[in-house]
Amino acid sequence: MAGPAHVTDCRSNPKDQIAHAAEIIGRSDHERDVFKYIYRGQKQHKKVSEIAKTLKLPRTRALDAGKALADNGIVTRVKIDGETAYGKDPFYRQHRSKILSLVKNPKKLKAYPTKTNPSITVRVPKIVFPRGFFIRAEQITVDGVDSFEKVKRVSPGSVQVQPMKEKKFKKGFQRIVGEKGKFQDWGGEKNDVFTTRVKIRGKRVPTAIAFKGPGKKGKLTPKMMGKNGDQIQRLFSSSAADAYLVQYWSQIDESIVEQMKALAVARSATERQKIYFGVIDGVDSARLIRAYPKSFR
């Protein structure tokens, strides 16, 4: 006699439930095979002994795989004639094919948009200005900033990237340029540091900087910039700045630079002002630390 069955609330974040199921099922071949067998055919429930025999698994292995699925609400668990049996959940029966396709393709699963892992597309509009219109937007590197003059003595090949906590690196950056202000982090800030003490081409240039701490991994892309992928736009909304920098502890994708360039061009055109923009990747961050060791103690 079957007992009461758990039913998934398919109205509550269905994409999150699909992704969660794929992650659980993808942890082992046994859980994947047991999931596929339970959801095969018209029979609602399948006993552990039946699962073990069909899949040629030890009974304990079949029981453990079914338990992992049941504990995560992916299958139902009941007793039939005194034996544990696992059955289909209506929601996961409907989305069986989608779940298995995500299990088969981890990259597809990672990119699958959910409420907790939204897919963010950042589009940089093409801006066209009349010929002769004032536009001066220049990309710079740490080697082109007067305030970081010592960094020229440190070759990129001589350093090893060892990520530093964002707060410590930010304080070191401030010491190099002589900025003693205090800057508190909060979710909606335009920038992490705004300073008028950065020198470029022999002049002090108001500069807004965004620091990405070591918590982020992999190549930096626009969608990694803030919860909504809008951190670069917010950085350029610091209207008092004439230079904008993004610092990160690994490789920075060219899409970041392209987006910064488009925004720098737009600011230069509207403000009729020279605008600088640039990125400081992991290697250049390590070069700064090597060039100014006392600032980062």
Image: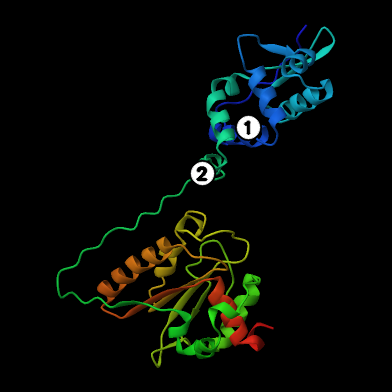
Q: Residue 276, percent across and down?
A: 37, 78
Q: Check whether the beta carbons of the residues at disc 1 and disc 2 lie within 8 A of each other.
A: no
Position of 67 with respect to 167 (left or right) is right
Mark 1, residue position: 21
As drawn, the label of residue 111 is 2
As drawn, the label of residue 215 is none
Secondary structure of the residue carrying numbered label 2: helix
The answer to which of marks 1 and 2 sits earlier in the sequence is 1
Q: Residue 209, percent across and down?
A: 49, 74
| Rendered residue at 54%/43% (across/down) | 107
Q: Residue 132, percent across and down?
A: 15, 75
Q: Amino acid at mark 1?
A: Ala
Position of 217 with respect to 269 (left or right) is right
Position of 105 with respect to 25 (left or right) is left
Asked if residue 267 shows in the view, the reply is yes
Position of 55 with respect to 186 (left or right) is right
